Image (tube, helix red, strand yellow):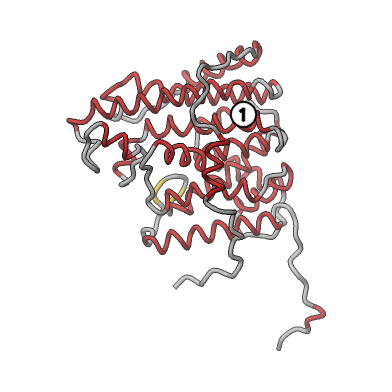
Amino acid sequence: MLAPSRILRTTPAQAGGGRSREALVERAREAIEEGSRSFHAASLLFDRPAREKAWLLYAWCRRCDDLADGQDHGRPAEGPAPEGRAGAERRLRAIRLLTERAFEGLPTADPAFDAFGLVARESGLTREMAEDVIMGFELDATGWRPRTEADLARYCYHVAGAVGVMMAVVMGVARDDGETLDRACDLGIAFQLANIARDIGEDDAAERCYLPVDWLVEQDIEPGQHMKPHHRRELAAMATQLVERMERHEAAARLGAARLPFRRRWAVLAAARIYGAIGREVRARGTAAWDRRVAIGRREKARHIAAAFWEAVKNRPPRPDPMPEWTRGSILIDVRMAGPVAKPPMDPLPDES
């Protein structure tokens, strides 16, 4: 027998979907500790309010990435393999639906999305910011690859630059402070360029390539053959291009870090140094860069954290000359020209068969 409509109640909207903040922060801490040791090390330098918000945002990013790729903390998930393009579209639809519920303060049954709802409410994150990041997961999930440098710039923005913008807002940067947000975007792009350079071999094994097709054509490399031993010199040259771009964005990001309170500035500079070291080690190894994965050990991280401390104290970063060619403004023109952010579908997902 159905209950009379007068006694039915709607689900109350609450930031965090009704979960306690303490529980969400603890789950988010576990996520970043397992998912990224470098980010976790840098986050410990934040003051507590910024640290907890950074963890909450990271938890959503990590969970979206895993859902889009059918993984668990960046590793293959147990169970059946992802079910092709149709499966990718369904998972992306789920990401958008759960993110929208999080913005509405409705429970999502997923702590990472509830965490995002909480930090979005506390920090003033917007749906447009979230959609810019989700579009990066969509590119990866649908097997996209860049043809030009402009394509690579847009990819780096979606998967990392847009995250940098959200992280800056979480750290208290005003949404209308375009200059500082531009520099936060630069930091994210620098991180991604370092990742691409380091992971060329791993990406190839996963049938992915983030080197622009135009670069491969210039180097006279056949499609899908860039990891062959006879192309290692050309591959090292392209990795050097990536690292040189990384260094320009890294240097520009320091200008934005200079505007942050001391502990937040220290954390950002430490992260920049650690990820910059990854890129520079790839370049230094040359043709041997992909024989084993580049990693920054604990002692080296500690040295970078100490150096970042004194850099944060001095706080006089030089302006790079030239500034990065890729800018948030120019990239966003391309992104917005593609059309307005679509309202996410809110109809229920079909049951698993």
Which residue is at the front of the view, 195 or 222?
222
Residue drawn where x is 55% and y is 42% of the image: 333
Q: Please tell me whether mark 1 sits on a helix, a strand or a loop.
A: loop
Taking 138 as reference, is 294 left or right? left
Taking 208 as reference, is 173 left or right? right
Q: Position of residue 89 (x, y in %)?
A: 46, 61
Q: Quadrant of residue 182?
A: top right
Q: Position of residue 221 (x, y in %)?
A: 22, 36
Q: Position of residue 208 (x, y in %)?
A: 33, 45
Which residue is at the front of the view, 223 or 54?
223
Residue drawn where x is 41% and y is 25% of the image: 243
Residue 34 visible in the picture: no
Residue assigned mark 1: 44
Taking 282 as reference, is 114 left or right? right
Residue 36 visible in the picture: yes
Q: Quadrant of residue 200?
A: top left
In this picture, is 207 found above or below 261? below
Residue drawn where x is 57% and y is 25% of the image: 253
Q: Position of residue 196 (x, y in %)?
A: 39, 34
In this picture, is 149 found above or below 6? above
Which residue is at the front of the view, 49 or 132?
132
Residue drawn where x is 70% and y is 52% of the image: 16
